[in-house]
Image: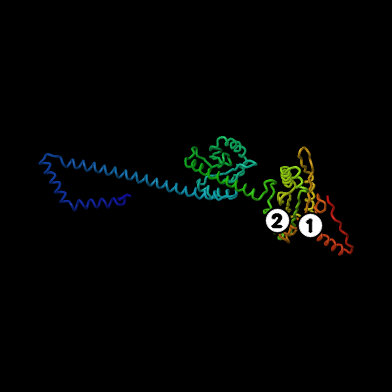
């Protein structure tokens, strides 16, 4: 801490002058005594004292300048420490935000929120590697789409070589940092670098952010995998029962608002237990997996495909009337009939019994499942390998026909039972 500042210098000079005036006679006496000593002992006392005082002044001035340099260095270090502390606080907040991300949308928001402040408003982009190739997740530049489309192929070629040596590289005035998780490159972080020489702070910060992002991307991927495994049957890829019931409940609530019909199909494989007994459970598992692939080929992406239990499957058809559901059910029954089991060099066919029901949201999911389950058992009792529509729904349709024909003045036509396909 400095005791004297520039503003205190006039006051110090005034104090020295006042002291000289106050002690003028005493100083004069000291000078007279010094002359007597010089005359008595033949000494040059005053010049020596003057030299000593001058050297003492230079010495004190040197100490003063050294103290100034130390104070300036300490102030510079304090500024650097404050900046570093602020940067570490930003990194900590960024790391906490990335650590909480459980989806790629949340990861994108974290990048947009924290990276511009950390990187001094430098343009930043984040690309991730997926099964379908590289995809831009976040980009702070206004022309991000056109830039990415024109450079994605070159970046992909560079990224293919990163598995061998995942080190930072320069591309189009961007410093690129690979995101490495479990010895695999899962993405690339690009930071704008218009300078000819890369600042040391940018290098260190980029490597730190790349490490945090790699962990966050890996966590998101693991969470998505765990979520998929918890909601989907690993053998068929279809939904498990609980998520399917929740999806049906959501479709029924939407149907109550929009008055659009919701249909459900339930089917199982005829004689599946016998297939397991005669050909083995591995053959049965292969058949179930093939049925799962068949459902993905035959149905819309918005349709729900569920392995309800064992060899029983539930299909949810949002915004599908009864006639459309019946057509889908016929198509599924025919497609299953086209499957074959090959065991010990022999091939045998497979059939399915199918039940269908439709609702406009006047019931809950459990009630609708009970009705389509009853229709499935009706198909089984009818001889299997056929489609049956919910009896209550069929009776309602017959009543509507009867009412319409009576209003037209004609006798109602007798209904005939549907034949098995």
What residue is drawn where x is 76% and y is 51%?
Answer: 267
Camera-nearest residue between 301 and 246: 246
Q: Position of residue 336 (x, y in %)?
A: 77, 46
- Number of callouts in the render? 2
What residue is drawn where x is 69% and y is 48%?
Answer: 238
Left or right, 127 with reference to 367: left
Left or right, 144 with reference to 3: right
Left or right, 67 with reference to 161: left
- According to the image, what is the colour scheme of the structure? rainbow
Mark found first going from the N terminus, 2 or 1: 2
Camera-nearest residue between 35 and 182: 182
Q: Position of residue 23 (x, y in %)?
A: 18, 52
Residue bearing the label numbered 2: 248
Camera-nearest residue between 337 and 17: 337
Q: Counting other residues with Cα less than 10 Å from the Cα at mark 2, is it few (<14), some (14-19), or many (20 or more)?
A: many
Q: Position of residue 263 (x, y in %)?
A: 75, 55
Mark nearest the camera among 2 and 1 is: 1
Q: Counting other residues with Cα less than 10 Å from the Cα at mark 1, is it few (<14), some (14-19), or many (20 or more)?
A: many
Residue placed farthest to the left in the image?
Answer: 40
Residue placed farthest to the front in the image?
Answer: 277
Residue 1 visible in the displayed image: yes
Residue bearing the label numbered 1: 390
Per the image, label 2 sits on a secondary structure element best described as helix
Per the image, label 1 sits on a secondary structure element best described as loop
Q: Are marks 2 and 1 in contact (CB under 8 Å)?
A: no
Q: Position of residue 243 (x, y in %)?
A: 67, 53
């Amino acid at each position: 801490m400095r005791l004297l500042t520039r503003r205190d210098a006039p006051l110090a000079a005034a104090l020295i002058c006042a002291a000289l005036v106050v002690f003028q006679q005493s100083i004069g006496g000291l000078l007279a005594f010094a002359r007597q000593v010089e005359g008595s002992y033949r000494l040059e006392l005053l010049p020596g004292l003057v030299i000593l005082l001058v050297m003492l002044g230079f010495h004190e001035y040197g100490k003063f300048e050294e103290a100034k340099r130390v104070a300036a260095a300490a102030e510079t270090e304090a500024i650097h420490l404050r900046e570093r502390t602020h940067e570490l606080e930003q990194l900590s907040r960024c790391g906490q935000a990335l650590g909480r991300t459980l989806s790629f949308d949340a990861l994108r928001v974290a990048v947009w929120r924290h990276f511009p402040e950390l990187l001094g408003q430098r343009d930043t982009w984040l690309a991730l590697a997926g099964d379908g190739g590289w995809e831009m997740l976040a980009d702070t530049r206004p022309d991000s789409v056109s830039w990415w489309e024109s450079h994605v192929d070159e970046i992909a070629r560079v990224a293919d070589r990163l598995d061998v040596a995942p080190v930072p590289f320069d591309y189009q005035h961007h410093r690129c940092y690979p995101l490495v998780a479990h010895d695999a490159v899962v993405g690339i972080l690009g930071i704008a670098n218009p300078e000819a020489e890369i600042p040391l702070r940018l290098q260190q910060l980029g490597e730190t952010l790349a490490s945090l992002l790699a962990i966050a991307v890996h966590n998101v991927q693991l969470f998505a995998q765990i979520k998929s495994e918890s909601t989907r049957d690993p053998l068929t890829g279809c939904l498990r029962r609980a998520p399917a019931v929740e999806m049906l409940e959501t479709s029924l609530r939407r149907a109550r608002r929009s008055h659009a019909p919701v249909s459900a199909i339930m089917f199982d494989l005829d004689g599946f237990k016998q297939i397991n007994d005669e050909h083995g459970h591995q053959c049965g598992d292969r058949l179930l997996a093939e049925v799962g692939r068949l459902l993905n080929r035959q149905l819309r992406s918005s349709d729900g495909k569920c392995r309800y239990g064992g060899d029983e499957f539930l299909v949810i058809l949002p915004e599908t009337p009864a006639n459309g559901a019946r057509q889908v059910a016929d198509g599924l029954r025919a497609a299953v009939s086209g499957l074959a089991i090959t065991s010990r060099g022999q091939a045998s066919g497979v059939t399915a019994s199918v039940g269908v029901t439709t609702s406009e949201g006047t019931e809950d999911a459990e009630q609708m499942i009970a009705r389509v389950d009853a229709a499935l058992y009706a198909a089984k009792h009818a001889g299997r390998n056929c489609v049956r529509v919910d009896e209550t729904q069929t009776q309602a349709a017959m009543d509507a026909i009867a009412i319409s024909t009576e209003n037209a003045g004609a006798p109602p036509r007798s209904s005939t039972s549907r034949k098995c396909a």
